[in-house]
Amino acid sequence: MSSETLDPGAPATLVIVGAGPRGTGLIERIAANAPELYAGSGLDIHLVDPHPPGAGRIWRAAQSPLLWMNSHAEDVTMFTDESVEMAGPVRPGPTLHEWAGIDGRTFADRQIQGSYLRWVHEQAVAALPPEITVHHHPGRALRVSGPRAGRQQVWLEGRDQPLSADLVVLALGHLDAELDEEQRELAAYADEHGLVHLPPDFTADSDLSALPAGEPVLVRGFGLAFVDLMVLLTEGRGGRYEGDTYVPSGREPVLYVGSRRGVPYHSKIGYDWTGERPPLPRFLGPAEIDGLLARPEGFDFRRDVWPLVEKELGFAHYHRLFTVHAERTAIAWTDFEEKYEAASAGAEREALVASAVPDPRDRLDLAVLDRPLDGVTYGSFEEFQEGLRGYVESDLSRRHDAAHSTDLAVFLGLLSVYGQLVRLGDIGSWWHGFFSYLASGPPGPRLRQLLALSRAGVLKFVGADMAVRAGDGVFRASSATVPGFSVEARALVEARLPEPTLRRALDPLLRELHADGAGENPDGLLRVDRADGRVLDRAGRPHPRRFALGPHTDGRTPGAFTRPRTGGPAFRQNDATARAALVFLRDLGADAVG
């Protein structure tokens, strides 16, 4: 317990920095848990965010209505259900499609999602006991100061006096960052030679006016940031689609896109689940996570964790194949399951699968899924364009055909695995990218638009491990996928979100935390206690009065909201943080009265 207590009769004070969906989810959990843990005591909650509560920066109304969510409306909820493993009570509520009264299979635009989030925020605030009040400060938090054993001060931009807080929770969301060394060199070259270099950014915030019509533009990144860029530079400039044909406005640049994989993220699955779900977790559950955490020497993700992930995803895949598509298998599921459980990774498991699953297309090969262009070369640039269009068409066909419902089973496996891995904390950045590539790709209609743009010559593919070099007054891109090919351009766009590291964050609050001794993992993320989100210092000690949730931490989750009935790791974290905060503040008040 802190050595400093509340003044008798004074309400406790909680400052939440970040009023987007994560901050809103935390308030919802405070409202749900307060009757049990904080009945009758006063509490002032101060929300600090320059953007409107609920929607925050990413989901604010002031962005193009052309930009969509990348999830079906029925797969978006801000409310807990019985699948969330947490100590607090379930408080059900509507999904996005139920609230908005739209078809569940719709990919809603972000303005609709922002409206939903604002409503959820209003409902969460209304559910608070009357003794708990919420105040919104529409500005930026610059730093947090104060002793470990005493009240904290949260300093706001444009305000001389800080907010005094008994507890602080950082729910900062996606943040801007300084350029890395390569990007700095490219940006400096662009300045010197009159070129355009757009750094990693939330695409809706990028100034795309510097990209001229008809000119080639190099684009690094093939994920969701690229999809937004593609939309804003085509339909956003007056182009339109007539069926599967794109009709240019004449104002579009020509986009040359590549990435590490050289292919777009996999399409969202376009059919519903039917029948029995795979019984998950099976090979990567609480017991396995407990075992990893108990290792005195620690664990290595690739050596110790990935084999469990691979086996779990394989189990989800083959459970679906054998129980629903048994005509494509050679032995009974009970026999395969027993042998699969006993088989070691590598050649033994591959031999089992080859003998039991005749068609290689029905086998799960995560390495090929992850890097489909590895070792693949094309004889010409045009041949690669045709080849990649065929790859995207095949992906679209498969992801919208329930005959391949093993893909949806793997998706459920990915969600189960993510929910377990969150407990491990520091697992490196590779897993998050792999998950997003397989499970968090664009809507199918976006990939059909991508194909139309490719056929229209507005979008061209560069290949895997796209290299960009500056020289002779231009940027030049190449890839081993098409040996000997390169393309020159006077503009380069880094189509991805900034890396949310402590050292490179432009957010002054995070930089001050780092200077004040906050711990960081090898990827530069803020270290937090896995149990309740308390910020850890460099010695691993949890700060009694500072918590953090979100993508800037090593406890990051797939998102602040989730698909219903899938466990919601973010909801579990919100509940744990809310309960820890309420208990701390309750005990602080009890000490004051005593």
Image: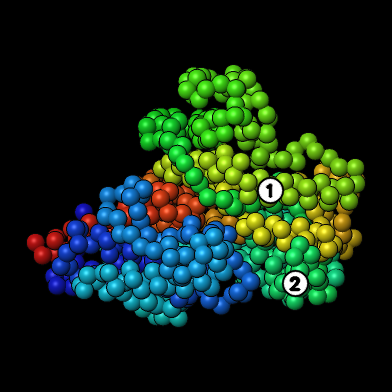
Image x and y of residue 132, in percent: 24, 71
Q: Can residue 350 be seen in this snapshot?
A: no
Q: Quadrant of the N terminus?
A: bottom left
Amino acid tagged 1: Ser
Image x and y of residue 103, in percent: 51, 65
Q: Is the residue marked by circle 2 packed among few (<14), some (14-19), or many (20+) residues within 10 Å?
A: some
Q: In this view, does 58 lie to the left or right of 460?
A: left
Q: Can residue 329 be seen in this snapshot?
A: yes
Residue receiving disc 1: 397
Give the CA separation, mark 1 to mark 2: 23 Å
Q: Element under label 1? A: helix
Q: In this view, does 108 lie to the left or right of 131?
A: right
Q: Is the residue marked by circle 1 packed among few (<14), some (14-19), or many (20+) residues within 10 Å?
A: some
Q: Is residue 330 above or below residue 150?
A: above
Specify the color scheme.
rainbow
Q: Residue at x 17, y 68 (%)?
A: 41
Amino acid tagged 2: Arg
Image x and y of residue 60, in percent: 52, 73
- Residue farthest toward the left in the current orientation of the protein: 594
Q: Residue 240 carries which label?
A: 2
Q: Which of marks 1 and 2 is nearer the N terminus?
A: 2
Q: Is residue 504 above or below residue 478?
A: below
Q: Which residue is drawn at 78% across and 36% down?
A: 375
Q: In this view, does 269 lie to the left or right of 32?
A: right
Q: Residue at x 42, y 54 (%)?
A: 564
